[in-house]
Amino acid sequence: MKRRDPRCSSGKTEPYVYDGYRLRCPSCQYSFLPLPVEPAFDMRVVPALIPCSFEQIKNRLKKFKAEFPARYRSEGRSRRRIRVLLASEVVKLRGLMIRPAKVKAA
Ligand SMILES: [Zn+2]
């Protein structure tokens, strides 16, 4: 993605580098969050969205570890980590969990 950064000190048009979270200028390190952002869901609500049990999701995420990198948000003063799934990951999981009924051959 190429965009002229009005706050860039280099005065050049640098291609921004996406680090998976923000777009960053390689020369001045100015970064911004590209909007709109993809919605993310707490693991506490994901079972309701699929729908399936919490254990089933946990097993699937373990099995397809490479496809679903773990992301966390922290909650409370103890900074308890709560796993978060992106909307696209919820859709992928749903595709793994929900299958159409087999059509019987006539
Ligand atoms: Zn810059």
Image: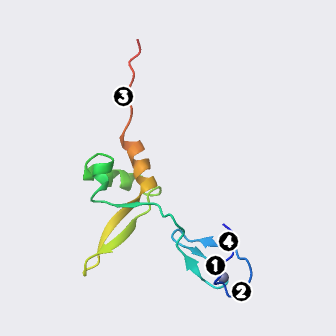
Tag 2: residue type? Ser
Query: Which badge, 4 or 1, comes first in the chain's sequence?
Result: 4
Query: Which badge, 2 or 4, comes first in the chain's sequence?
Result: 4
Q: Residue 34: horizontal and vertical position, in percent?
A: 54, 69
Q: Which residue, as the protein is rendered here, is positioned at the far front?
A: 6
Tag 1: residue type? Cys
Would you say the beta carbon of the disc 1 residue lies within 8 angstroms of ligand 1? Answer: yes
Q: Nearer the viewer, mark 4 or mark 3?
A: 4
Query: Which badge, 2 or 3, comes first in the chain's sequence?
Result: 2
Q: Nearer the viewer, mark 4 or mark 1?
A: 4
Residue that appears at 31% across and 72% down: 81
Q: Secondary structure at mark 4?
A: loop
Label 3 Cα neighbours within 10 Å, binned few <14 / some 14-19 / many ≥20: few
Residue that label 1 marks: 25
Q: CA distance from mark 4 to mark 1?
A: 10 Å
Cβ–Cβ under 8 Å for marks 2 and 3: no
Label 4 Cα neighbours within 10 Å, binned few <14 / some 14-19 / many ≥20: few
Q: Secondary structure at mark 2?
A: loop
Q: CA distance from mark 2 to mark 4?
A: 14 Å
Residue that label 2 marks: 10
Q: Nearer the viewer, mark 2 or mark 3?
A: 2
Q: Is residue 9 above or below residue 85?
A: below
Label 2 Cα neighbours within 10 Å, binned few <14 / some 14-19 / many ≥20: few
Q: Nearer the viewer, mark 1 or mark 3?
A: 1
Query: Which badge, 2 or 1, comes first in the chain's sequence?
Result: 2
Tag 4: residue type? Arg
Disc on res. 101? 3
Cβ–Cβ under 8 Å for marks 2 and 1: yes
Q: Secondary structure at mark 1?
A: loop
Which quarter is ligand 1 in?
bottom right
Q: Is residue 85 above or below residue 25?
A: above
Q: Is residue 100 above or below residue 92?
A: above
